[in-house]
Amino acid sequence: MLAELAQHPGGVSLPRLCKRLGVRMSVLLRTLAWLGDDAIGGRPGPGWVAVEPEGARSIARLTERGQATFAAARPGSDDVAQP
């Protein structure tokens, strides 16, 4: 998911992201919650992804922390991601 969002710096609509990833909306929403700031089990998420309203639709995008994590995870990267 991080790789797909990294290709769209301005964000991508949730239905389009579902189609690109080949998952149902319910799966996408649970994953976005886990990758975002939402607390799950009393622990805050990593804050890698944000979902924001844009008109009548919702847009998912990488946060700065998500961009840094994705960049650090790429082969050959010397960056170190901060949790």
Image (tube, grey):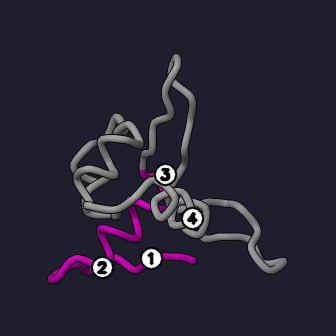
Could you tell whether 16 is left or right of 76 in the image? right
The kind of secondary structure element at disc 2 is helix
Residue in view at x 54 percent, y 57 percent:
29
Name the residue: 84% across, 77% down.
42
Q: Position of residue 11 (x, y in %)?
A: 37, 39
- Mark 4 closeness class: few <14, some 14–19, many ≥20 residues within 10 Å: few
User: Callout 3 environment at 10 Å: few (<14), some (14 to 19), or many (20+)?
Assistant: some
Taking 8 as reference, is 29 left or right? right
Q: Which residues are magenta?
A: 62-83
Q: Quadrant of residue 68?
A: bottom left
Q: Nearer the viewer, mark 1 or mark 2?
A: 2
Q: On the image, numbered disc 4 is attached to which residue?
A: 30
Q: Mark 2–mark 4 contact, CB under 8 Å?
A: no
Residue 73's mark?
A: 2
- Of the residues tagged 4 and 1, which is closer to the observer? 4
Looking at the picture, which amino acid does disc 4 mark? Arg
Task: Measure the C-alpha gap from mark 3 to mark 2.
Answer: 15 Å
Q: CA distance from mark 3 to mark 1?
A: 13 Å
**Label whose residue precedes the other's in the sequence (4 or 1):** 4
Residue that carries the numbered disc 1 in the rendered image = 81
> Which of the marked residues, 3 or 4, is nearer the chain's N terminus?
4
Image quarter where the C terminus lies is bottom right
Find out whether residue 68 is within the magenta segment. yes
* Earlier sequence position, callout 2 versus callout 4: 4
Decide: marks 1, 2 in contact (CB < 8 A)? Answer: yes
Reading the image, the residue beneath label 3 is: 63
**Pointers 3 and 2 in contact (CB under 8 A)?**
no
